[in-house]
Amino acid sequence: GKLKDWRKQASAIQLVAFKGGDSEKACFAQDMSIRAQFQNKLAGVCEDMCKEVGAYPKCAQCPQFV
Protein backbone atom coordinates (compact mmCIF):
# COMPACT_ATOMS: atom_id res chain seq x y z
CA GLY A 1 0.00 0.00 0.00
CA LYS A 2 1.86 3.02 1.33
CA LEU A 3 5.32 1.74 0.37
CA LYS A 4 4.25 1.15 -3.23
CA ASP A 5 2.72 4.64 -3.36
CA TRP A 6 5.93 6.13 -2.00
CA ARG A 7 8.00 4.24 -4.57
CA LYS A 8 5.77 5.50 -7.39
CA GLN A 9 6.16 9.07 -6.16
CA ALA A 10 9.93 8.72 -5.79
CA SER A 11 10.19 7.20 -9.27
CA ALA A 12 8.15 10.03 -10.76
CA ILE A 13 10.44 12.61 -9.16
CA GLN A 14 13.51 10.80 -10.44
CA LEU A 15 12.07 10.69 -13.96
CA VAL A 16 11.43 14.43 -13.93
CA ALA A 17 15.01 15.06 -12.80
CA PHE A 18 16.41 12.61 -15.33
CA LYS A 19 14.50 14.14 -18.24
CA GLY A 20 16.12 17.49 -17.56
CA GLY A 21 13.18 18.94 -15.66
CA ASP A 22 13.71 21.20 -12.72
CA SER A 23 14.19 18.65 -9.96
CA GLU A 24 14.15 21.26 -7.21
CA LYS A 25 10.67 22.44 -8.22
CA ALA A 26 9.48 18.84 -8.53
CA CYS A 27 10.78 18.02 -5.04
CA PHE A 28 9.22 21.16 -3.58
CA ALA A 29 5.84 20.43 -5.15
CA GLN A 30 5.92 16.84 -3.93
CA ASP A 31 6.99 17.95 -0.45
CA MET A 32 4.13 20.45 -0.24
CA SER A 33 1.64 17.80 -1.34
CA ILE A 34 2.83 15.35 1.30
CA ARG A 35 2.84 18.04 3.99
CA ALA A 36 -0.76 18.99 3.16
CA GLN A 37 -1.86 15.35 3.34
CA PHE A 38 -0.10 14.92 6.69
CA GLN A 39 -1.60 18.11 8.16
CA ASN A 40 -5.07 17.05 7.04
CA LYS A 41 -4.57 13.67 8.71
CA LEU A 42 -3.42 15.33 11.95
CA ALA A 43 -6.35 17.73 11.91
CA GLY A 44 -8.71 14.77 11.76
CA VAL A 45 -6.99 13.10 14.71
CA CYS A 46 -7.02 16.32 16.71
CA GLU A 47 -10.71 16.84 15.99
CA ASP A 48 -11.51 13.28 17.09
CA MET A 49 -9.53 13.75 20.30
CA CYS A 50 -11.32 17.03 21.10
CA LYS A 51 -14.69 15.35 20.57
CA GLU A 52 -13.71 12.54 22.98
CA VAL A 53 -12.79 14.96 25.76
CA GLY A 54 -15.77 17.26 25.10
CA ALA A 55 -13.71 20.27 23.99
CA TYR A 56 -14.91 20.31 20.36
CA PRO A 57 -15.29 22.81 18.69
CA LYS A 58 -13.74 25.25 21.16
CA CYS A 59 -10.39 23.56 21.71
CA ALA A 60 -7.66 26.18 22.01
CA GLN A 61 -4.87 23.66 21.35
CA CYS A 62 -5.92 22.51 17.89
CA PRO A 63 -5.16 24.42 14.73
CA GLN A 64 -8.02 25.58 12.53
CA PHE A 65 -9.84 22.55 11.27
CA VAL A 66 -9.20 21.80 7.59
Image (cartoon, rainbow, N blue to C red):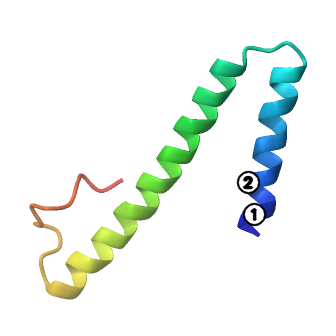
Q: Quadrant of the N terminus?
A: bottom right
Q: Are marks 1 and 2 in contact (CB under 8 Å)?
A: yes
| Residue 61 location, quadrant | bottom left
| Residue 45 location, quadrant | bottom left
* Residue at 82 percent of width and 32 percent of height: 14
Instruction: Kindly state the secondary structure of the residue where label 1 is placed.
Output: helix
- What amino acid does circle 1 point to? Leu
Q: Could you say which disc has been placed on residue 53 in the image?
A: none
Relative to 12, residue 53 above or below: below
Between the residue at mark 1 and the residue at mark 2, the CA separation in whole angstroms equals 5 Å
Q: Is residue 27 left or right of residue 32?
A: right
Mark 1 closeness class: few <14, some 14–19, many ≥20 residues within 10 Å: few
Relative to 33, residue 52 above or below: below
- In the image as oriented, which residue stretches furthest toward the bottom? 52
* Residue at 83 percent of width and 24 percent of height: 16
Q: Is residue 44 left or right of residue 20?
A: left
Mark 2 closeness class: few <14, some 14–19, many ≥20 residues within 10 Å: few
* Residue at 82 percent of width and 37 percent of height: 12
Q: Could you say which disc has been placed on residue 6 in the image?
A: 2
- What amino acid does circle 2 point to? Trp
* Residue at 48 percent of width and 46 percent of height: 36
The picture places residue 20, in percent across and down from the top left corner, at 85, 12
Q: Could you say which disc has been placed on residue 3 in the image?
A: 1
Total number of numbered discs in the rendering: 2
Relative to 55, residue 25 above or below: above
Instruction: Kindly state the secondary structure of the residue where label 2 is placed.
Output: helix
Q: Is residue 29 left or right of residue 2?
A: left
